[in-house]
């Protein structure tokens, strides 16, 4: 496992520090867009409440990434290294947490990521929040569930070679999940249709992981080929504030984006759809509580104080060393 300081040194050497540390998951931009767009696919009984709180749902989508340096178990919730468990692991890994713990032990699961199981846990928490009509928790859990579902749709969140570090492609993680959507997602078609009921949330989470993992080879191999033809031309310099950053050039990003033939858009669209499906399913399974009663909710002074405290903690200096995976 890479140590943070080692990653820092390494990225500095590459000159990629800006790219690597500015973003997380789909990048702040991507996660926010996924949550925001999911709201618009909800049925009439839900959309009013979610629209009213769309600012929070959008902004809080990135909170899980922010706290991964301050909460011990957080980092492992953002990925699963499927290939660590062998070639056919995608199909043989136990789908349910208890079975997986029995087979692999909890320590092993936590070492190689718990993303699909954590999504299911979040679904239950959200359902419970709906059951007791706890507005604060409904909002918090909806926003954060969208984050983890977003991560599950990123191919490089499902492999040990998460940043191309095994194949000499360091930097590909943020390139695929942050740089490409930032440059091109305005052109994506995000039409997903209405949110639908999910008969089995745990298996639905796994299906997202499967889709991501099956794309890992293309993500890595196509970039490797392209890198060979571009050589050093794949980088350029951009200024952000007072910093000059070495980034993947626009030409290179465009070429890679074309070769992937809409993959980034498809994964992002699927993330939007599944996020809305999970919100909808939790609401249905909680007996379809009347959200119009909650619509005039305004955070109390205590709640605002708590949110501020959470933010401060998240923004504090990193205390927990983690690896580049979820960055
Ligand atoms: Zn994440």
Image (tube, rainbow, N blue to C red):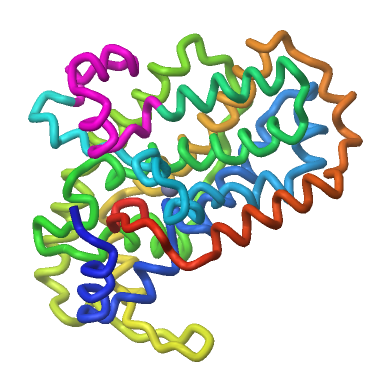
Q: Residue at x 23, y 76 (%)?
A: 9
Q: Nearer the viewer, residue 238 or 99?
A: 99
- Report x, y in % for residue 252: 28, 71
Above or below for 216 versus 199:
below
- Report x, y in % for residue 51: 78, 40
* Left or right placement of residue 182 versus residue 93 in this view: right
The answer, for residue 187, to whether it is visible in the render is no
* Left or right placement of residue 50 versus residue 67 in this view: right
Q: Nearer the viewer, residue 47 or 63?
A: 63
Q: Residue at x 23, y 57 (%)?
A: 163
Q: What is the tally of numbered marks visible in this picture?
A: 0
- Report x, y in % for residue 237: 35, 86
- Report x, y in % for residue 35: 60, 43
* Left or right placement of residue 8 versus residue 230 in this view: right
- Residue stretch in magenta: 90-117
Does the magenta portion include 97? yes
């Amino acid at each position: 496992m890479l140590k943070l300081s080692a990653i820092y040194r390494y990225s500095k050497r590459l000159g990629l520090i800006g790219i690597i540390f500015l973003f997380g998951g789909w990048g702040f931009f991507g996660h926010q867009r996924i949550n925001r767009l999911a709201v618009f696919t909800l049925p009439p009984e839900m959309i009013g409440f979610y629209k009213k709180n769309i600012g929070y749902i959008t902004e809080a989508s990135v909170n899980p990434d922010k706290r991964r340096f301050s909460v011990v178990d957080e980092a492992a919730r953002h990925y699963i290294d499927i290939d660590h468990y062998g070639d056919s692991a995608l199909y043989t890994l136990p789908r349910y947490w208890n079975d997986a713990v029995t087979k692999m032990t909890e320590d092993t699961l936590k070492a190689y990521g718990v993303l699909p199981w954590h999504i299911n846990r979040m679904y239950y928490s959200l359902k419970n929040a709906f059951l007791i009509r706890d507005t604060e928790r409904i909002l918090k859990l909806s926003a954060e569930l969208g984050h983890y579902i977003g991560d599950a749709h990123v191919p490089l969140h499902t492999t040990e070679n998460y940043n191309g570090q095994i194949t000499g492609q360091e930097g590909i993680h943020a390139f695929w999940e942050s740089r490409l959507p930032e440059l091109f997602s305005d052109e994506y078609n995000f039409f997903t249709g209405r949110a639908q009921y999910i008969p089995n949330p745990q298996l639905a989470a796994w299906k997202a992981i499967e889709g991501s993992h099956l794309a890992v080879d293309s993500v890595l191999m196509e970039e490797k080929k392209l890198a060979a033809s571009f050589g050093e031309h794949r980088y350029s310099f951009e200024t952000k504030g007072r910093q000059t950053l070495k980034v993947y050039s626009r030409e290179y990003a465009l070429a890679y984006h074309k070769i992937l033939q809409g993959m980034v858009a498809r994964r992002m669209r699927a993330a939007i759809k599944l996020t809305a499906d999970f919100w909808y399913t939790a609401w249905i399974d909680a007996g379809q509580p009347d959200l119009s009663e909650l619509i005039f909710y305004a955070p109390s002074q205590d709640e605002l104080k708590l949110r501020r405290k959470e933010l401060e903690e998240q923004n504090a200096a990193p205390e927990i060393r983690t690896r580049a995976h979820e960055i």
